Image (spheres, grey):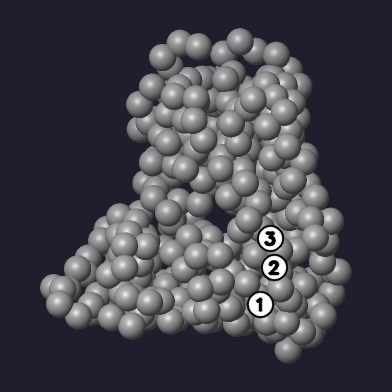
């Protein structure tokens, strides 16, 4: 392979555009092609970045100028199309979640392992300065013994978010609602900072929107360390508030809000507040921007060039999906669920209305 990794984008919607802008800022990488069956949309994004458009994934995978593919399609197609890419020997960077079911996510991971293709998942919260600082503080013992790790994603989505993108808010393509789509980033960060989870007890509701999935979910986590955690995820909380992670240990506490640490109170330490003050997706999914996609893609490119695992591998993405599924299983069955889950478990498409 040459020093430059050729990247293709599969899917030319909002997320595909974010990836294209991020790739332009990644060293040793170039956008080589845009892939989408929707010709007009593919042409528009391809023309914007001066690359060719291809309208068939199979044809794109035959190209010599495609080393890896960014999978930026509806969630229910992530593993299906990502597996095609991996089986062709091309590396895969898939948007969150890795898929909407554990069996499909498992197939993608195994396809990468069988072909030698790298599989990575977009969880950019792990790459923010504030997220890394909080992870280092907890793992380094700054907070003492962890007692509580709580995540809150109290966002709002206007009804047009669902009506203008018919796959949003469906079991078939979204795999759920506020948890698996919006809340999954903080589930991943919560697990990365707080450690493995032993059990989950959850409730979910469709509280506001005319959709078939949840727009409100609450869960109680017990970590393997014995610490407890609360998760709240919503797209029904008007007007939408920045996502938050609260950490409480025997020696102190910290609060991460959006991309900033707003509180850091540890015995014997000076406050370490601050961050990047970037906009969040609290009320507008287009406000997230591409800044923290850049280090994720840079790590993916470096992993290919250095022949190592990406920082957020397919296995990592599968573990986060397992935790999401544990929440759904608990809410569905009305009882505490212990991990690990059987990897053939899939949720029933039914949510109580509020």
Kind of element beneath mark 2: loop
Quarter of the image where one finds residue 183: bottom right
Q: Quadrant of residue 280?
A: bottom left
**Depth-wise, is mark 2 or mark 1 nearer the camera?**
2
* Residue at point 20%, 80% (across, down): 267
> In the rendered picture of this protein, how many numbered marks are placed on residues?
3
Q: Residue 127: horizontal and vertical position, in percent?
A: 39, 50
Quadrant in which residue 147 is drawn: bottom left
Q: Earlier in the sequence, mark 3 or mark 2?
A: 3
Image mark for residue 339: 2
Give 71 or 312, whichever is nearer the viewer: 312
Residue 201 can be seen, yes or no? yes
The one nearer the camera, 257 or 142, is 142
Contact between labelled residues 2 and 3, with CB atoms less than 8 Å apart: yes
Q: Are marks 2 and 1 in contact (CB under 8 Å)?
A: yes
- Crowd band around label 3 with a 10 angstrom C-alpha radius: few (<14), some (14–19), many (20+): many
Q: Which residue is painted at 54% across and 32% down in the image?
A: 45
Residue 200, label in figure: 1
Numbered mark located on residue 322 in the image: 3
Q: Position of residue 86 (x, y in %)?
A: 69, 29
Q: Nearer the viewer, residue 20 or 5?
A: 5
Given residues 90 and 206, the one toward you in this image is 90
Secondary structure state at the residue bearing disc 3 = helix
Q: Residues within 10 Å of mark 2 (few under 14, many from 20)?
A: some
Q: CA distance from mark 3 to mark 2?
A: 8 Å
Q: State which quarter of the image contains the C terminus.
A: bottom right
User: Which percent across, then down, holds residue 52?
Assistant: 58, 18
Vertical position of residue 232 compared to residue 1: above or below:
below
């Amino acid at each position: 392979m040459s020093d430059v990794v050729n990247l293709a984008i599969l899917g030319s919607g909002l997320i595909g555009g974010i990836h294209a802008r991020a790739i332009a800022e990644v060293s040793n990488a170039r956008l080589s092609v845009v892939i989408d069956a929707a010709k007009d949309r593919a042409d528009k994004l391809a023309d914007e970045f001066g690359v060719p458009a291809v309208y068939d994934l199979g044809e794109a995978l035959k190209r010599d100028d495609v080393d890896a593919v960014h999978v930026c399609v509806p969630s229910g197609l992530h593993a299906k199309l990502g597996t095609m890419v991996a089986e062709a020997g091309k590396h895969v960077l898939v948007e969150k979640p890795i898929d909407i079911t554990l069996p499909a996510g498992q197939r993608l991971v195994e396809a990468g392992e069988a072909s030698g293709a790298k599989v990575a998942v977009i969880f950019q919260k792990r790459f923010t300065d504030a997220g890394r600082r909080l992870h280092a503080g907890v793992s380094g013992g700054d907070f003492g013994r962890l007692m509580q790790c709580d995540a809150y994603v109290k966002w709002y989505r206007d009804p047009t978010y669902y009506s203008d993108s018919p796959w949003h808010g469906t079991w078939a393509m979204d795999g759920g609602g506020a948890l698996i789509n919006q809340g999954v980033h903080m589930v991943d960060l919560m697990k990365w900072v707080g450690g493995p989870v032993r059990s989950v007890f959850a409730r979910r509701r469709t509280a506001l929107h005319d959709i078939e999935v949840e727009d409100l979910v609450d869960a109680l986590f017990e970590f393997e360390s014995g610490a407890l955690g609360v998760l709240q995820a919503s797209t029904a909380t008007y007007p939408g508030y920045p996502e938050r992670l609260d950490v409480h240990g025997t020696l102190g506490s910290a609060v991460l809000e959006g991309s900033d640490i707003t509180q850091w109170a540890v015995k014997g330490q000076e406050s370490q507040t601050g961050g990047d003050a970037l906009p969040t997706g609290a009320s507008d999914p287009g406000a997230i921007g591409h800044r923290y996609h850049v280090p994720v893609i840079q790590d993916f490119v470096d992993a290919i060039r250095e022949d190592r695992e990406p920082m957020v591998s397919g296995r990592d993405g599968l573990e986060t999906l397992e935790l999401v599924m544990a929440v759904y299983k608990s809410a569905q069955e009305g009882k505490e669920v212990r991990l690990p889950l059987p990897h053939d478990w899939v949720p029933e498409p039914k949510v109580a209305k509020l």
